[in-house]
Amino acid sequence: MSSIGRIRGFSDILGQEARKFRFMEDRAHSVFSRYGFRELRLPMLEHTELFARSIGSDTDVVQKEMFTFPDRKGRHLTLRPEATAGAVRAYIEDKLYSGGGLTKLFTVGPMFRYERPQKGRQRQFHQVNAEAFGSASPLLDAEMILMLWTYLRELGLTDLTLQINSLGCRECQPVYAERLQDYLAHTDRSRFCADCQERAQRNPFRLLDCKQSQCQELMRGAPSMLDSVCSDCRSHLDTVLDSLQQLGIPYEVNSGLVRGLDYYQRTTFEIVSGAIGAQSSVAGGGRYDDLVRQLGGPDHPAIGFACGMERLSLLLEDPGPEVTDFYLAVLDPEGFSEGMRICEELRRKGWKGEMNQETASVKSQTRHAHRLGARFCLFLGQEELARESITVKDMSSGQQSQCGKEHLPDMLRQ
């Protein structure tokens, strides 16, 4: 019978990669909690309408990339393609706004999009997300970027560039849309890719986000969004930029940065790396001040960001396996029960280790202790059972000594 393999675009995460993921998760908990963020664990399945209403029915994510299916009652469900919509749904449904003030949340977990698998991009991918609700202040924008920058720096990343833009608000975006349509009216639309030819009719903003080289070239002369933003949006961006400068965070203003989701407005940003090829963005986000209201909640502004863990992993060094303190080699079948008791006593005192479950030679068990990277190999045979002692081998020096079982924790500590 043939074996069953993985689904294309879905990966097993183990070994070095698993260690990197644990490192990213642990660092997220450490950094984000220092800024007052609390963890939120979201379901992986949501009603399809949630993403159609939030992300935008004309976006590639909703049109082409979502894993959507009917359940047994005919309701359309979707594996989450991103986390913000679910966080907003939870903010509304669980009334997280009831206490007033800012609500700061972060999530870690898998997302799903039906895309062409490539380096740093899978159909099941993982993100670290942070969302802050309840303030329209540009100082919050700067603090969110600062927290993201701090997180990436504490992961050990240095070769990064922050790109930032303003998408304007719902009042100045139509002004820009009209200027963009005027530009497109004097452009040969047949030269755009098939997707952009459709986007030009439905949502011309999406043309700015196309990754096809011919479309990027055609849009190079398009008017800048920054020339159309209202005075309030311009002032908002200027305050964010001034704050970043005071915080010592270098940035580049990129007037073509729009990101791929419809809910963004005003501040939008990405952090890119030149070390991972074409898929250079490792994190990004922005404001979505109308989204809570659009999904049936109070009119509360919000801002968030997401980090792609697969892409971050490409930039990280292996943090290395956790230290194994001991390996207990039981050399006599009568010693297994006593060996388990000794191991458990050491674990309760904080030591990490394991023991064999079947008898084997001293040589083979010593080799296994080496493979585990154990600091000490402990031997329990007939002689040790009779003396109620343990033979301890320091694996780095090769020295061996005996001690009573009751003194073993102190000896290992010394």
Image: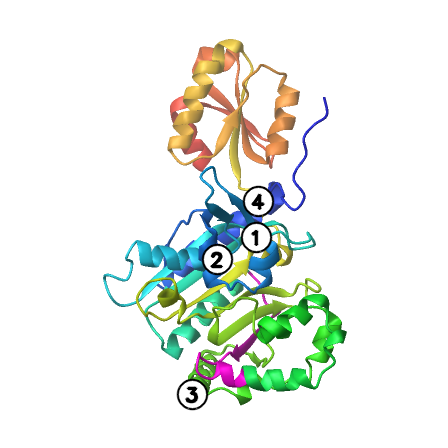
Instruction: Tell me what residue is drawn at x 56 percent, y 46 percent.
Output: 19
Distance (Cα) linking label 1 and label 4: 26 Å
Residue hosting label 4: 18
Residue 195 lies, with reference to residue 311, above or below; the image says below
Between the residue at mark 1 and the residue at mark 2, the CA separation in whole angstroms equals 9 Å
Q: Position of residue 65 (x, y in %)?
A: 60, 55
Label 1 Cα neighbours within 10 Å, binned few <14 / some 14-19 / many ≥20: many
Question: Residue under circle 2?
Answer: 51
Labelled disc at residue 66: 1
**Which of the two discs, 3 and 4, sits closer to the camera?**
3
Counting from the top left corner in percent of width and height, residue 154 is at 50, 62
**Quarter of the N terminus within the rendering:** top right
Question: What residue is rendered at 44% in x and 14% in y?
Answer: 337
Residue at 51% in and 74% down: 268
Specify few, some or many for label 2: CA neighbours under 10 Å numbering under 14, 14-19, or 20 or more.
many
The segment highlighted magenta reads 156-176
Mark 2 or 4: the one toward you: 2
Task: Mark 2 or mark 4: name the one nearer the start of the chain.
Answer: 4
State which quadrant residue 240 falls in.
Answer: bottom left
Q: Quadrant of residue 302?
A: bottom left
User: Is 173 colored magenta in this rendering?
Assistant: yes
Residue 377 point in image, percent of width and height? 55, 28
Q: Upstream in the sequence, badge 1 or badge 2? A: 2
Q: Is residue 96 visible?
A: yes
| Alpha carbons under labels 3 and 4: distance apart | 44 Å
Label 1 and label 3: CA atoms lie apart by 37 Å
What's the CA distance linking mark 2 and mark 4? 30 Å
322, 376: nearer the viewer = 322
- Mark 3 lies on a secondary structure that is helix
Residue occupied by mark 3: 235
Q: Which of marks 4 and 1 precedes in the sequence?
A: 4
